[in-house]
Image (cartoon, rainbow, N blue to C red):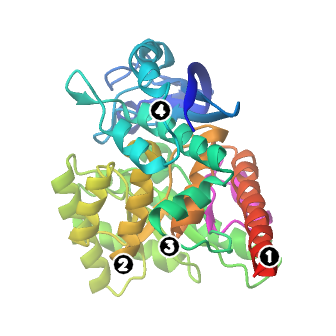
Amino acid sequence: MKITEALFTPALSSFYFDDQAAIKAGAEQDGFTYVGKAKTPGFDRIRQSGEAVSVLLKLKNGLWAEGDCAAVQYSGAGGRDPLFTAAGYIPWMQEVLRPLLIGRDVAEFMGNARYFDRLEQDGNRIHTAIRYGLSQALLDATAKASGRLKVEVVCDEYGLPIELKPLALFGQSGDDRYNAVDKMVMKGVDALPHGLINNVASKLGRNGGKLQEYMTWLTQRILQLRSDASYSPVLHVDVYGTIGMIFANDHGKISAYLAGLGERVSPFELYIEGPVDAGSKPRQIALLKEIREALRARSSSVKIVADEWCNTYQDIVEFVDAECCDMVQIKTPDLGSIHNTVEAVLYCREHGVEAYQGGTCNETDVSARTCLHVAQATRPQRVLVKPGMGFDEGMTIVANEMRRNLAILQAKNASVSVMT
């Protein structure tokens, strides 16, 4: 079946673009905005409204497939592509992509995804956000052309079994890191709270004291609120390199601090995402490896999650092969086409490193639902609840999509069993 029309329309993402460099440098908040000048190229202000572009593909059978081009909250940081705006990219998409899409056969997803993922503009691969959204629409097109769920398309093309089990979901709190914990415990999320520890003075503390106090509170709050003693969520906190900042990237001091956090949160398991930002991929890999080895030497159970400088499929391969982390965040918009997410999760699983299929609060309902299908096919150890920072909205979108898919897949499985 072929595509007969392709449309590109401006859309809103579920959060905002933030200038990470300015925030880490100490920019102060004024209500929901930040005071001061932007530091990252492309930003007009430190916090800007999030944008997306919806890709709509009409099929010969009259159905419309959809995908949303979205970029991460901290665009332009840690080796990522620059700020993504609808006005800046839709004209090019109409001029270049539309002719390439109309008339294209969508019987198979993977070939189409690879073709557009390799496409270049002025000698460079096209923006990751475009490749991300377009691949979502192409996957949806293949599914709608064949009467399958997107998860079934991925499983069929990669030779993966369909597993009728729920995934472990990870809630993110944004700056509402206290009230959100109550919500997450009430809804029984598998991992929490993310925490958004992206500023030394206001969130980590000059000597790390504020995060220590928060982790103690977090542990006590879960024990106080849980209605079932068997509920034992994993604690996963993203610190955006701030721990490295207060300890001058000294792996010994960092590991000692992290080990202390691990002791504070007993009996829960602790993952720390992005403890340092070493400024480049080689230095990041080397420093994370030193921290991880130092933690092991201390017999600490704290686990390290790679994020900064681990953006593309090839980056993920390098981090995994270096054995510098316990878990990799596969930040879906940064990988471009979602077939790269599929293959990144599978690579992690094959090489004994935990896969966290993440993304960003700055996505849309469409991209979040598509990512859930991909996760149900590839089975990462952790899946981010997204989009947005309100938790409840993202939890509704992701958890309900998962449960609907499971119900449909179970019904199909039962039908096949009866027939055979």
Q: Residue at x 30, y 83 (%)?
A: 296
Q: Nearer the viewer, mark 3 or mark 2?
A: 2
Q: Which residue is mark 2?
A: 352
Residue 82 occupies quadrant? top left
Identify which amino acid the numbered label 1 is placed on. Ala
State which region is magenta. Answer: 168-191
Q: Is residue 96 above or below residue 316?
A: above
Q: Amino acid at mark 4?
A: Arg
In the picture, the disc for residue 414 is 1
**Residue 214 visible in rendering:** no
Per the image, the residue denoted by label 3 is 270
Question: What kind of residue is marked 2?
Answer: Gly
Q: Say left or right for 81 vs 109.
A: left
Instruction: Give the alpha-carbon distance from disc 4 to disc 1, as whole Å.
Output: 35 Å
Within-10-Å neighbours for mark 3: few <14, some 14–19, many 20+: many
Binning the other alpha carbons within 10 Å of mark 1 as few (below 14), some (14 to 19) or many (20 upward) gives few
Q: Are marks 4 and 1 in contact (CB under 8 Å)?
A: no
Q: Are marks 2 and 1 in contact (CB under 8 Å)?
A: no
